[in-house]
Image (cartoon, rainbow, N blue to C red):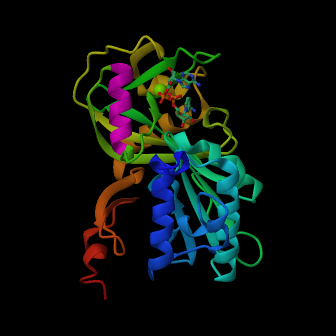
């Protein structure tokens, strides 16, 4: 067997021969066949799945014999495929590239593809083919940070920390960044425990702060949510790496102190108001509801709806 027909190259040639015979299935979109004769990867090799908006998704990790493919041949095949997709009226192309195949990013970029997003093990490039400016949605715009305002109603004390890594050592609520797929209340409880050793449970959501071009969010926007938590352990064992100090402080002292951030001060006043007038005045409580379209569940946060408004009985 000639050396060129060994291993993965042979598999590509055989795959191409099969595709010429079989053609593309109805759910798949194929590129033109002209490149198949003069490059190891034919345009029809770059087959993608159609999405409901009329775009094509190609996952390079699913294609055969990519290991041997050189970027020049890839670029030629991609160009032919894009031409074909354009003529078929496809609105966009999504190119999913595993990190070890990153040598194909530059050839795609030279054809107009841009990064849409990257995960730890892959990147997603996109190309808008439709009329006018791109209507493709962007990727993540915000990071979500959650703090726990852990208030002990019996002692009227609130749990506060000073951050070790800040230039100014001001009192604030313990908290941190939410992990992917983590509920807001779970983030608050987890971060409070990791930073202070205090165990607590979620009661309500108190406030949301939105800040753009946040330095800690790699220039993206920051959503900082403060939750009201109820403690069920009281002995502090704080994280020395993140916190300089941690203590149970009288809520009235936190309300008065100048050595705090504006948001902490505002929430302290809100908590004092809730403590005196009833937490229903300040709480956005949470309820889990079914999602109509996906069959999943979501958490909805709002002021408590009186029972008669929930059922709408006796409302006339
Ligand atoms: N107004 C307020 O009272 C404050 C609000 N926030 C909000 O809290 C959220 C973030 O909370 P944090 O406690 O900062 O996060 P966090 O508790 O999730 O993580 C902080 C720790 O992550 C590590 N870390 C973070 N960036 C790092 C880097 N570039 N290199 C190496 N290590 C790094 C450090 O160990 C740091 O102590 C954001 O939403 C922010 O806006 C944070 C501080 C004060
Ligand atoms: Mg933190």
On the picture, is 296 further left or further right than 142? left
Q: Position of residue 64 (x, y in %)?
A: 46, 55
Give the residue at x 66% y 67%. Answer: 35
Could you tell me which residue is drawn at 70 percent across and 42 percent down?
213
The answer to if 190 sits in the magenta stretch is yes
Residue 52 in percent (x, y) is at: 50, 77
Task: Say above or below: 159 vs 68.
Answer: above
Q: Is residue 94 above or below residue 190?
A: below
Q: In the image, 316: left or right of 241? A: left
Q: How many marks?
A: 0
Magenta span: 185-196
Q: Give x and y (percent) for residue 193.
A: 32, 26
Up-down relation of residue 227 to residue 27 (above or below):
above
Nearer the observer, 291 or 136: 136
Whether residue 129 is visible here, answered yes or no, is: no
Residue at the farthest front position: 1
Residue at the image point whose x is 66% and y is 62% from the top: 78
As drawn, 45 above or below 23: above
Q: Is residue 126 visible?
A: yes
* Magenta stretch: helix, strand or loop mostly: helix
Observer-nearest of 45 and 295:
45
Check the image and name the residue furthest to the bottom: 316
Based on the picture, tell me whether residue 191 belongs to the magenta stretch.
yes
Q: Nearer the viewer, residue 18 or 176?
A: 18
Q: Position of residue 219 (x, y in %)?
A: 68, 39
Residue at 31%, 44% in the rendered image: 203
Which quadrant of the figure contains the C terminus? Answer: bottom left
């Amino acid at each position: 067997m000639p050396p060129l027909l060994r291993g993965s190259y042979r598999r590509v040639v055989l795959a191409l021969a099969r595709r010429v015979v079989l053609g593309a299935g109805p759910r798949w979109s194929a590129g033109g066949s002209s490149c198949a004769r003069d490059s190891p990867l034919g345009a029809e090799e770059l087959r993608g799945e159609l999405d409901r908006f009329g775009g094509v998704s190609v996952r390079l990790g699913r294609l055969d014999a990519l290991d041997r493919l050189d970027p020049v041949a890839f670029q030629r095949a991609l160009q032919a495929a894009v031409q074909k997709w354009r003529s078929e009226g496809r609105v966009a192309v999504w190119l999913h590239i595993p990190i070890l195949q990153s040598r194909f990013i530059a050839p795609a970029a030279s054809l107009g593809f841009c990064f849409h997003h990257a995960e730890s093990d892959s990147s997603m490039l996109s190309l808008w083919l439709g009329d006018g400016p791109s209507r493709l949605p962007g990727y993540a715009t915000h990071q979500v940070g959650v703090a726990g305002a852990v208030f002990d109603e019996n002692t009227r004390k609130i749990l506060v920390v000073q951050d070790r890594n800040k230039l100014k050592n001001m009192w604030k609520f313990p908290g941190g960044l939410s992990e992917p797929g983590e509920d807001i209340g779970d983030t608050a409880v987890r971060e409070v425990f990791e930073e202070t050793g205090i165990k607590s449970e979620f009661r309500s959501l108190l406030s949301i702060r939105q800040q753009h071009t946040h330095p800690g969010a790699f220039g993206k926007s920051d959503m900082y949510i403060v939750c009201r938590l109820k403690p069920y352990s009281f002995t502090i064992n704080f994280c020395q790496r993140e916190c300089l100090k941690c203590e149970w402080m009288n809520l009235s002292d936190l309300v008065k102190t100048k050595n705090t951030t504006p948001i902490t001060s505002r929430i302290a006043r809100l908590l004092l108001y809730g403590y005196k007038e009833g937490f229903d005045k300040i709480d956005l409580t949470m309820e889990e509801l079914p999602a109509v379209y996906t069959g999943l569940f979501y958490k909805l946060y709002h002021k408590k709806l009186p029972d008669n408004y929930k059922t709408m009985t006796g409302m006339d």
